[in-house]
Image (spheres, grey):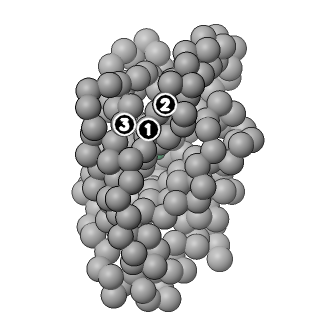
């Protein structure tokens, strides 16, 4: 396994629509090895998720994992390791919440993005098995963030109020306390 180089904002690969992976490709050693590398890269960078375009590979694959003690996102509820292949994401209902997001491709910047509070996610796992799940709350925000990458979108596109942009240090200093208070209510409401 190896740790892959992460593309940062301005790289054209982050702005294109990624292509579907065929089930034959998915079963191959090459793409199984790529998924292993993507997981290792996410864990090495303490990311809550990473999408294939972020490592210069524009295919519709993303991985998500939140452990209880993520230093970048200590307030996030845990999400077990999930490999999304060719996912489609559909909002359920109209409920939304404000999420303070960051991204491995946007170093040292966070900003508030409005996200759907409930989404349906249909995807293949790394064995090619189909899944159809509902994801709620803060975890739903994480799935939306990663699926956006597959369509060339980055969280900065969705920041409605540019005055919320903050370096990580200033976020810790000036914004974290109020956000954690707000997001804790979201976690309590949706259970995730
Ligand atoms: Ni990202």
How many numbered tags mark residues here?
A: 3
Please give the label number shown on residue 188. none
Sequence order check: which comes first, mark 2 or mark 1? 1
Q: CA distance from mark 2 to mark 1?
A: 6 Å
The quadrant holding residue 150 is: bottom left
109, 127: nearer the viewer: 127
Would residue 24 appear left or right of 167 to someone viewing this image?
left
> Mark 1 = which residue?
136
Sequence order check: which comes first, mark 1 or mark 3? 3
Q: Say if mark 1 contacts mark 3, CB within 8 Å.
A: yes
The quadrant holding residue 9 is: top left
Q: Say if mark 2 contacts mark 1, CB within 8 Å.
A: yes
At x 39%, y 17%, the residue is 162
Quadrant in which the N terminus appears: bottom right
Quick check: can you spot residue 145? no
Q: CA distance from mark 3 to mark 2?
A: 9 Å
At x 33%, y 19%, the residue is 160
Asked if the beta carbon under badge 2 is closer than 8 A to the nearest atom of ligand 1, the reply is: no
Kindly state the secondary structure of the residue where label 1 is placed.
strand
At x 29%, y 80%, the residue is 22
> Mark 2 = which residue?
190
Q: Where's residue 58, x and y in %?
A: 34, 64
Q: Where's residue 20, x and y in %?
A: 27, 70
Q: Where's residue 88, x and y in %?
A: 28, 56
Q: Say if mark 3 contacts mark 2, CB within 8 Å.
A: yes
Q: Is residue 134 placed above or below 84 in the rendered structure?
A: above
């Amino acid at each position: 396994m190896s740790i892959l180089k992460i593309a940062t904002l301005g790289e054209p690969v982050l702005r294109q629509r990624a292509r579907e992976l065929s089930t034959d490709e998915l079963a191959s050693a090459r793409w199984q090895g790529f998924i292993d590398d993507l997981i290792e890269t996410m864990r090495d960078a303490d990311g809550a998720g990473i999408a294939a375009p972020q490592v210069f590979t524009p295919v519709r694959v993303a991985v998500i994992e939140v452990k209880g003690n993520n230093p970048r996102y200590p307030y996030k509820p845990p999400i077990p390791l999930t490999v999304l292949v060719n996912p489609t994401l559909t909002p359920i209902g109209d409920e939304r919440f404000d999420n303070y997001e960051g991204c491995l491709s946007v170093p040292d910047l966070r900003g508030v993005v409005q996200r759907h509070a409930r989404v349906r996610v249909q995807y293949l796992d790394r064995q090619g098995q189909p899944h159809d799940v509902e994801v709620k709350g803060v975890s739903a925000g994480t799935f939306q963030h990663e699926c956006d990458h597959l369509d060339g979108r980055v969280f900065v596109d969705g920041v409605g109020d540019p005055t919320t942009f903050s370096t990580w240090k200033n976020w810790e200093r000036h914004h974290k306390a109020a956000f954690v208070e707000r997001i804790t209510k979201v976690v309590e409401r949706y259970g995730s």
